[in-house]
Image: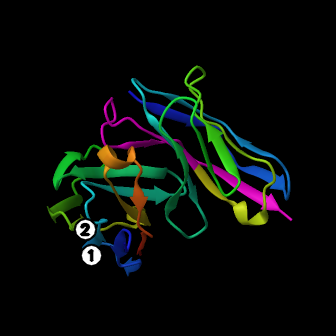
Amino acid sequence: GDSVTQMEGPVTLSEEAFLTINCTYTATGYPSLFWYVQYPGEGLQLLLKATKADDKGSNKGFEATYRKETTSFHLEKGSVQVSDSAVYFCALSNYYGGSQGNLIFGKGTKLSVKP
Amino acid sequence: DAGVIQSPRHEVTEMGQEVTLRCKPISGHDYLFWYRQTMMRGLELLIYFNNNVPIDDSGMPEDRFSAKMPNASFSTLKIQPSEPRDSAVYFCASSRPGLNSGEQFFGPGTRLTVL
């Protein structure tokens, strides 16, 4: 079945450092890919998404490119801020494939940014 | 749009009591999901509905848990009897995957504490 694997945390960075959180997936067909973010004490919210190969999703300085050849969707940010401290979840949707209407989530990566 | 609405936001109860969590999805969304999140087990999908019909309840931990969706604008998750190990944050989410590539919109969650 469909699955998502993301790097385990926690990840601790200093402010203005470069961030990469790796995410790879297994799926049949042509899934859509997402990054969700969960700030402390809140629900999950969509950070960015890409719906087809080579698409780049971007938001709030974060970027991720849908790479079908490497089945990856790595999250990057050039300069993190303390306010980026949160848990980040990679996810896929395969509506016309194996997972139908469901989202398949990775286990989440906790990011802590120190001033 | 008001987003996904959950109530109550916090619930404290004693072991053995019945607990009912409520969710109002975004109007027009035809999928509804219930998740549970704990430190130990992370984010778990409990059950999801399509057009008010349960599609997959394999994540429901045991018979003490039940979920209903009597109409397109309301769902409940009931725990009877509750146990301390049910303490968690419960999230409801809704989506319309045929329209928005499977993106799910999450509610703020209900923090349940069973004493």
Q: Earlier in the sequence, mark 2 or mark 1?
A: 1
Which amino acid type corresponds to the residue marked 2 in the rendered image?
Pro
Q: Quadrant of residue B92?
A: bottom left
Q: Quadrant of the C terminus of chain A?
A: bottom right
| Distance in Å between CA atoms under marks 2 and 1 | 5 Å
Q: Residue B79: tell me if it is visible.
A: no
* Residue A53 visible in image: yes
Q: Nearer the viewer, residue B49 or B39?
A: B49
Left or right position of A45 against A23: left
Q: Position of residue B113 (x, y in %)?
A: 43, 73
Q: Residue at x 19, y 50 (%)?
A: B54
Do tag 2 and tag 1 residues touch (Cβ < 8 Å)? yes
Circle 1 packing at 10 Å, graded few (<14), some (14-19), many (20+), is few
Q: Which residue is mark 1?
A: B17
Residue under mark 1: which chain is it in? B
Q: Which residues are magenta?
A: A89-115
Residue B86 in the image, given as x and y percentages of width and height: 38, 63
Subunit that carries the residue with mark 2: B
Q: Position of residue B100 (x, y in %)?
A: 38, 48
Question: Few, some or many C-alpha atoms within 10 Å of disc 2 (few <14, some 14-19, many ≥20)?
Answer: some
Indicate the position of residue B53 as horizontal and vertical percent values. Answer: 15, 51
Q: Residue furthest top?
A: A69
Q: Which residue is mark 2?
A: B81
Residue at point 40%, 53% (across, down): B104
Residues A103 and B102: in front is B102
Residue type for callout 1: Gln
